[in-house]
Amino acid sequence: MSAEKNQAEKKPLRAKKKWEEWYDVYYSTAPQQDVRFYVELARNSGGPVLEIGVGTGRIAIPTARAGIDVTGIDLHAPMLQRAAEKAGKKQPGHGNLRLVEADMRNMNLGQRYPIVTIPANTLLLADNQEDQIRTLQTAAAHLHPDGRLAFDVFIPDPAALAQSQPEPLVWAETAHPDTGNRVVISAISAADAATQINRETQIFEEFDHQGRLAGRAELDVTIRYLFPAEVHALVEQAGLAVEQVFGGFDRSKPSHHSEEFVYLCRTATA
Ligand SMILES: C[S@@+](CC[C@H](N)C(=O)[O-])C[C@H]1O[C@@H](n2cnc3c(N)ncnc32)[C@H](O)[C@@H]1O
C-alpha cells in the first residue's frame, strides 16, 4: 500500500466524526456530580437559567426536565443541533429549553437571569486572558442585580503539565452510549507554562463487537488553564465578587486534595 493511499484511507476516518458526535462518549467516562450541582442550583433559584457553552445539553436538558426554563448558548451550531435532537427524544419536562448560537466573549441576549452558569471548564476554552475576562464580563452583563454566576475550573497540576505527552496515552475505555461498542480514548498533549496554554488531541477509537475498528476521530482542545489566585483577579476585573468557593460539586471546603474549584459569584456592587 502506498503512503498516499494509506493517507487517503486514514483522512476520512479522521474527519468523519466531530466533537458533537463524541462529546457524550467523552462525558460518559466522567462522574456526573456536576449535573446534580447545577440542576439543584437552578431549582433552588426557580430560574430561568442561562448556561454558557451548553454543548449537547448534558446539564441543560435535565435542568429543563426539572421544570426550570433554560437558555443555552453555544458557539458551535452542531453542538446545539445535537442538544435539540436529544431534548426532542427525552420525555418533555416542564421547563422550556431555548438554544441560541452565540459567542460567550461578546454576546448580548438582551435579558438578565437570576442564575448564569459556565459549567465543565468552559471558561478555559477562552484561550487567552483577555477573552476569559470578556467571558466573565458577558456573564456579569446577563445577571440580575442580585443574581449568581456559577462556574467550575479544574486545579492545574504543575508537575503533570510540565510533562508533554507526545505519544498517545490511553486514559479511558467506555461503552459507546448509542452502539454499546467499546471506545478507547487516548490523548496527546503539550502545555506551555509561560502562556498557561495546554493543547490536547483526544483520540477516539471505536471497536465493533468483533473487535474491528468501526470509527476513529482526533479532536483538538486548546485551553488556557487558571490557578485559583488568577480566577479571583479575573472575577474582580469583570465587576464580580467571589461569594463562595467549593472544593468540588459536593460543596466541600477547598483543599489541596480538590481537583476542581466551583465558584459562586455575585455582582460586586450588589
Ligand atoms: C466542555 S463543553 C461544556 C458543555 C456543557 N456545558 C456540559 O457541561 O456538558 C464546552 C462547550 O463550550 C462551547 N464553546 C467553546 N467556545 C465557546 C465560545 N466562545 N462561546 C460559546 N460557546 C463556546 C463548545 O462548543 C462546547 O459545546
Image: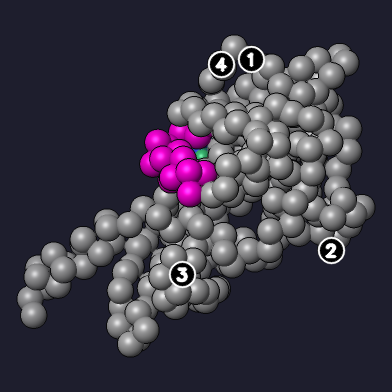
Kindly report the distance in space between the C-alpha atoms of the residues bearing marks 2 and 3. Answer: 31 Å
Colouring mode (rainbow / by chain / secondary structure / one colour): one colour
Element on which disc 2 rests: loop
Tag of residue 257: 2
Kindly report the distance in space between the C-alpha atoms of the residues bearing marks 4 and 2. Answer: 38 Å
Element on which disc 4 rests: loop
Residue 41: tell me if it is visible. Answer: yes
Q: At 27% from the left edge and 58% from the top edge, which residue is drawn?
A: 16
Q: Could you tell me which quadrant the C terminus lies in?
A: top right
Residue underneath mark 1: 111
Tag of residue 108: 4
Q: Residues within 10 Å of mark 1 (few under 14, many from 20)?
A: few
Q: Could you tell me which quadrant the N terminus lies in?
A: bottom left
Q: Amino acid at mark 1?
A: Gln
Mainly helix, strand or loop, the magenta region? helix
Pointer 4 residue Cβ closer than 8 Å to ligand 1: no
Kindly report the distance in space between the C-alpha atoms of the residues bearing marks 1 and 3. Answer: 38 Å
Q: Name the residue nearer the viewer: 196 or 150.
A: 150
